[in-house]
Each structure stands twice: as structure tokens, then as C-alpha cells.
Image (spheres, grey):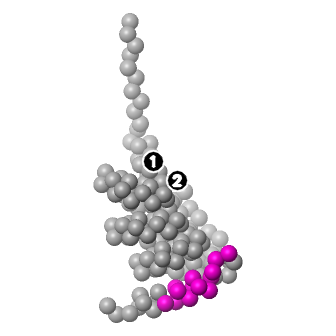
Amino acid sequence: MGEEEHSVEQNPQEMMLDNIEALLEAARYDDIDDVKSIASAGLSLDSKDSQGRTALHMAAANGHLDIIVYLLRNGVDVNASNVENNTPLHWACLNGHIEAVKHLILAGANISALNRCVISNSHFRVSHQYLNIDGLFGKLDGIMLEKEKPS
């Protein structure tokens, strides 16, 4: 008697979760080709993992500008929040990625958004001493003025 072939099939929900994880990993590790490939396969670029993180959270946290720009141009929610109510802007500020912060603000990120710890992006000014906070927020003031200029 021959052995029966057993194929392991994932249910659609497991496949979706795997695709979301792949998207977030690609954004985290600056793999723009994988981000584009996953998007072209039909997965929403606003997809969230079990912790509420999006590809924009991952790209912002790591300062990956090419992915941030791609995601923003494709209409992702710049103010998406995770389970801790952190937005991509929170993560970019926390990690000192000034150019990422600039792109997010110019795309409409809410600089007053509060996270679960009731910390807004402007609170990073006093709560994270390891950042060059004066430099970061001095530049933010300039960004806000630039954003308000008529086109």
C-alpha cells in the first residue's frame, strides 16, 4: 500500500496573519521590494498585527524613509494607533528619526495624539533624555511653519 499524500493547508485567516507579519517584517527591515510585492498581492497596507502595529509603525520606528514615503503615497492612515495608542509619530520621535518625523507631520500626523501612558509626541521633549530633544523639537517648529505655508 502506498502512503497517502498529506498536504498542509492554512486556513485563510492564518494566511492573512502570515502576510501581515511578512509586511511588517519587510517594513521593519527596509525591504521596499517585499512591501510592494505584498501590496500588489492584495494585502491592505493598513493591516495590523495582534498588537495593532502597522507597516508605517515599523518603518517610522526604524527611520526607513523610502518605505514611509511609499506607504504615505499609498494612502495609509498616518495616525493609526496600536494597542498602546502609540502612533507611527510616537515611535519616530521615541527613536529620534527626525526625517521620519518630518514626513509624518507633513502627511498630517497628529502631534497631540496621546498614548496609553498619556504621553503625547510633544511630551518626548521632557521624558526621553537620551534624545537631542531641543534639536528635534526645534526642527519640528520649523516643520510646522513649513506645513502652514500656502502652496
Q: Judging from the image, what secondary structure is the residue with disc 2 in?
A: loop
Graded by Cα atoms within 10 Å as few (under 14), some (14 to 19) or many (20 or more), the crowding at tag 2 reads few
Give the residue type at disc 1. Leu
Q: Which of 115 and 105 is in front in this view?
A: 105
Classify 82 as above or below 129: above
Query: Which span is picked out in magenta?
Result: 130-142
| 30 drawn magenta | no
Q: Which mark is residue 50?
A: 2
**Which residue lies at the image location 44% right of the left edge and 42% below the top edge?**
14
| 137 drawn magenta | yes
Classify 12 as above or below 76: above
Is 145 on the left-hand or right-hand side of 73? right
If you read the primary sequence from the N terminus, does the residue marked by circle 1 or circle 2 appear first?
1
**Which residue lies at the image location 54% right of the left edge and 57% below the top edge?**
51
Is 90 on the left-hand or right-hand side of 147? right
Give the residue type at disc 2. Ser
Q: Which mark is residue 17?
A: 1
Residue 48 position within the rendered picture, expressed as x and y whole percent measured from the top left: 46, 57
The answer to whether marks 1 and 2 mark residues whose Cβ atoms lie closer than 8 Å is yes
Q: Nearer the viewer, residue 51 or 2?
A: 2
Q: Judging from the image, what secondary structure is the residue with disc 1 in?
A: helix
